[in-house]
Amino acid sequence: MSAAGGHLRVIGTGPGPDHWMTSETAAILAEATDLVGYHPYVARCPERPGQVRHASDNRVEIERAAHALALAAAGRKVAVVSGGDPGVFAMAAAVMEAIDRGPAEWRRLDLTVHPGVSAMQAAAARLGAPLGADFCAISLSDNLKPWETVARRLEAAAEVDFVVALYNPASKARPNRIFEAFDLLRRVKAGETLVIFARAVGRPDERIVVTTLAEADPALVDMATCVIIGNSATRRIERGEGREPWVYSPRSVEAD
Ligand code: SAH
C-alpha cells in the first residue's frame, strides 16, 4: 500500500522562461519533497532547502518514472519534471507505461498530470499563427521508434497537407536525420512552402528563421530547435522597415 501523504505530480516547466511556467506548476515545485527528471530540466527549477533532486540521463525514462512512483508510494511528495508540456514527447507517457507494467499499488497512487506550454505553441506565438490550421507534431528522434516509421509519418503528413511541428530534429548521435527529413519533404511539397526554425524560444539565445523549403538550410537546426513546416496555404505578411514578417495558416481550406 502507498504510505499516507505521498503523491506524484507530473509537470512541465514550459519552454524556458519562468513566465511561461504555469502558476499551478510553480506551486507544485514549491511543495515537492523530491524532483525527478532529466538533469537540465531539474536544474532549471528553483532550489528549495530540504528538497531532494534526482537528476538523471535522458535515456532512462521508464526507470526514472518507476523510481518516482516508488518514492511516492513510500510517502514522498514527488514532482516528475519535463520541459514544455509533460504530455508532449515527455515524461507523462513514461509514467503511464511504468504504471501499466508495474505493481498494482501504483494504480492507487495520488497521481495527477498538469499541462504546460509546449515548444510548438511558444514558437507559433512568436510568428503569429503558423499552427492556425490542422497540424501534427512529429518527433524526429529514432531512439524509441524506427527511422522508417518516422519517415513514413512525415511523408503522410506532408501528403495530406498538415502543418508539421518537428521536435527533437537533430542529435549529436544522428546529425543527418534532419537532412534526410528535408530531402523527403522536398520530394512531396512545393519549394515555396514556408519553413520556420524556432531555436531556444523564450531564452536569451532565441533565434527564429523564416525561410522556404527550397532555401532552408537544415544545418541551422539543433536539439534546441522546433521546426515548423507550413501547409500549402501558410503565408507571410510582410511588415516592412526591418520588421520580421508574421506567418499564419488560414483556418479556411478550399475543397481538395
Ligand atoms: N515536452 C517538451 C518537448 C520535449 S522534446 C515540450 O512540450 O515542448 C525536446 C524538443 O522540444 C527539443 O529537441 C526541441 O525540438 C523542442 N524544444 C523544447 N524547448 C524549446 C524551445 N525553447 N525552443 C524551441 N524548441 C524547443
Image (cartoon, grey):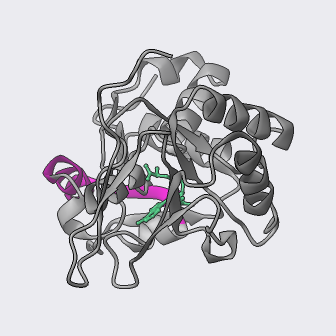
Point out the stretch of residues depicted in magenta: 23-38
Give 151 or 66, whichever is nearer the viewer. 151
Image location (x, y in percent) of residue 139: 62, 46
Give 87 or 188, whichever is nearer the viewer. 188
Give the side of residue 38 with respect to residue 112, left or right.
right
User: Which residue shows up at 29% across the image and 67% down it?
Assistant: 245
Q: How many marks?
A: 0
Image location (x, y in percent) of residue 71: 48, 44
Give the side of residue 97 with respect to residue 59, left or right.
left
Residue 218 visible in image: yes
Give 76 or 175, whichever is nearer the viewer. 175
Image location (x, y in percent) of residue 129: 28, 48
User: Which residue shows up at 65% across the image and 62% down it?
Assistant: 214
Give the side of residue 94 with respect to residue 52, left or right.
right
Image location (x, y in percent) of residue 152: 77, 32
User: Which residue shows up at 48% across the image and 37% down it?
Assistant: 92
Residue 92 on the magenta span: no
| Residue 128 quadrant | bottom left
Give the side of residue 241 with respect to residue 139, left or right.
left
